[in-house]
Amino acid sequence: MWLFITSLVITSFICNSPAYAYDNNPLQDICVAVNNSHASVFVNGKICKDPKLATPNDFYFSSLNFSRDVYPKYGIAVTIVGVKEMPGLNTLGISTSRADIEPQSLFPFHMHPRATELITVLEGTLYVGFLVPDPVNFFKSRLFSKILNPGDVFVFPIGLIHFLYNVGHKKAVVFGSYNSQNPGLITIPSSIFASEPPIMDDILAKSFQLNKTEIAQLRNKFS
Ligand code: MN
């Protein structure tokens, strides 16, 4: 009997434990983001617009059927639909994106500090992968990679470095979903080699086990 009661107490404790999300769960039905702090309420994320003033367009975004302009250096185009682009996403913990990748072009190593990314391939053939740190040796990692075709879905866990390489002969189109209204995007090579102010050569040389001439060459490529 006591065992039963004890297990019941433990079970109810576990079931009543709060679920932890990286974005706050909404505390109200809607919270359309506004920049004007007058006559508004700060809840979490951004300041909320007075719900009476919210409009259908706050919850709307269009033109995701088109590619943005391609970054010539990389051969990729990205459209992010987060809280900045769609204020009604505020506090909802979700956002979306579209990426267009030219044949033989790479969406380089990057990570999203606040979200897991779930991708769906609409067009093209991609070789994608993410790196999981080795739990016993933090100087090593394990690569999880896959060739993806239209209709394929793949997930990049939160905070892990990943890439998408178009290995096909036509443009690839990928849609992404994120469990954050503001997933963040850190592109590893350029954020390191094109920082402002620049990181000392010595630090870069030691980090990448290169000499200073090689570091200067890399800096030129990313500036
Ligand atoms: Mn990504």
Image (tube, rainbow, N blue to C red):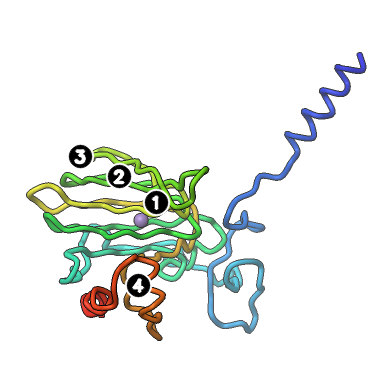
Q: Quadrant of ligand 1?
A: bottom left
Instruction: Identify residue type, mark 2.
Output: Thr
- The residue at the far top in this view is 1
Q: CA distance from mark 4 to mark 3?
A: 38 Å
Disc sitting over residue 205 in the figure:
4
| Earlier residue among tags 4 and 2 | 2
Image quadrant in which the N terminus is located: top right
Asked if the residues shown at circle 3 and circle 2 are in contact, with their CB atoms under 8 angstroms apart, the answer is no
Residue 176: x and y, percent? 35, 52
| Earlier residue among tags 1 and 2 | 2
Instruction: Identify residue type, mark 3.
Output: Asn
Disc sitting over residue 177 in the figure:
1
| Vertical arrangement, residue 171 with respect to residue 40, above or below | above
Disc sitting over residue 120 in the figure:
2
Q: For mark 3, does the 10 Å Cα neighbourhood hold few (<14), some (14 to 19), or many (20 or more) residues?
A: some
Is disc 2 placed on a helix, strand or loop?
A: strand
| Earlier residue among tags 3 and 2 | 2
From the image, tell me which residue sits under label 3: 149
Q: Does the numbered disc 3 mark a residue whose Cβ is under 8 Å from ligand 1? A: no
Q: CA distance from mark 3 to mark 2?
A: 9 Å
Residue 38: x and y, percent? 63, 84
Q: CA distance from mark 4 to mark 2?
A: 38 Å
**In the image: residue 7, left or right of residue 217:** right
Disc sitting over residue 162 in the figure:
none
Is disc 1 placed on a helix, strand or loop?
A: strand
Residue 113: x and y, percent? 48, 60
Is disc 3 placed on a helix, strand or loop?
A: loop
Q: Residue at x 88, y 21 (%)?
A: 5
Asked if the residues shown at circle 1 and circle 2 are in contact, with their CB atoms under 8 angstroms apart, the answer is yes
- The residue at the far left in this view is 169
